[in-house]
Amino acid sequence: LFFTENLFSWDTTAAKYFPLKVGNSWTYNGVGTFPGPCWTREKHTVTGTTVYNGHLYFTVNLIGYYFLYYYYLRIDSTNMNVFRYNSGGGCPWTPSENLLDSLRSRMLDSFKVECTNWWKNIDTVWQNVFGINKPAKHTYWFDGFEISQSRYLSKDFGLTKWVNCAGAAGCCTKTLIGCLIDGIIYGDTSLTGMNPISNNI
């Protein structure tokens, strides 16, 4: 098989903001005024790889109180953009996938997520992640009326926090409470209170 990503040099510094590797996992806890999934824990685990349309994707297993499914991510080495496979569409310029993030983005850089939303890297900050100070990128999107989203990518840990707000419905904040990175466990990776009712995916 031929993968176009391998023709270009890998930006090791940018890649550290999204450590996509088989075996790594991230556990998040939610708080906020949104109902349902906002109030629960969820765990994302990279379980393997697969190929779609000539691209190598990492398979991520998501376990939550309300859902259990797989999704597929890749990092394009030509621009260090993070893409999610979308069998039902994608954007005209990226068929069958959607842009999720731009790891090379610098402060005030903008990039188009999910075909329509212009996200901006509004700040570069330092975050205390499990007792370790790490540089982080803070990106933000606002629809100009009442819906907004923001997220933080921390070096060596990846996505540590994201916030969704929808006007009167309030906001939902998901925060990283534990992870397994390169075989090292940080924080709490358990899914306390989870009660699986089926083995089916």
Image (tube, helix red, strand yellow):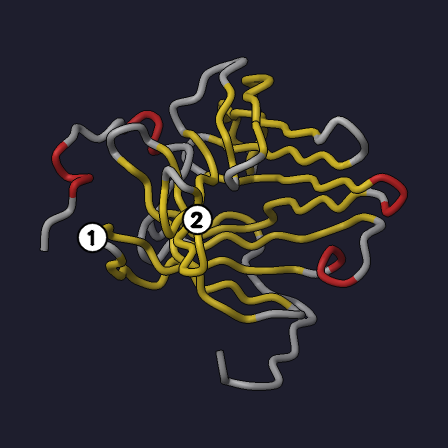
Q: Quadrant of the N terminus?
A: bottom left
- Judged left or right of residue 80, residue 66 is right
Can you name the residue that lies furthest to the front here? 92
Residue 54: image tag: 1
Query: As rendered, which of 89 and 54 lies closer to the eye?
Result: 89
Residue at horizontal 16 percent and vertical 41 percent from the top? 4
Query: As rendered, which of 91 and 127 lies closer to the eye?
Result: 91
- Report helix, strand or loop for mark 1: loop
Question: What x and y, as percent, mark residue 171?
Answer: 79, 43
- Report helix, strand or loop for mark 2: strand
Question: What x and y, as percent, mark residue 191?
Answer: 61, 66
Q: Which is more N-terminal, label 1 or label 2?
A: 1
Can you name the residue that lies furthest to the right here? 168
Can you name the residue that lies furthest to the top here? 108
Residue at horizontal 16 percent and vertical 30 percent from the top? 8
Compared to residue 158, the image places residue 1 above or below, namely below
Residue at horizontal 65 percent and vertical 73 percent from the top? 194
- Judged left or right of residue 30, residue 136 is left
Compared to residue 178, the image places residue 112 above or below, namely above
Question: What x and y, as percent, mark residue 181?
Answer: 39, 48
Mark 2 Cα within 10 Å, few/some/many (few <14, many 20+)? some
Residue 4: image tag: none
Mark 1 Cα within 10 Å, few/some/many (few <14, many 20+)? few
Which residue matches tag 2?
90
Q: Amino acid at mark 2?
A: Gly
Query: As rendered, which of 4 and 17 lies closer to the eye?
Result: 4
How far apart in space, not on screen, are marks 2 and 1 (Cα)? Answer: 16 Å
Cβ atoms under marks 2 and 1 closer than 8 Å: no
The nearer-to-camera label among 2 and 1 is: 2
Residue at horizontal 65 percent and vertical 79 percent from the top? 195
Question: What x and y, as percent, mark residue 149?
Answer: 67, 36
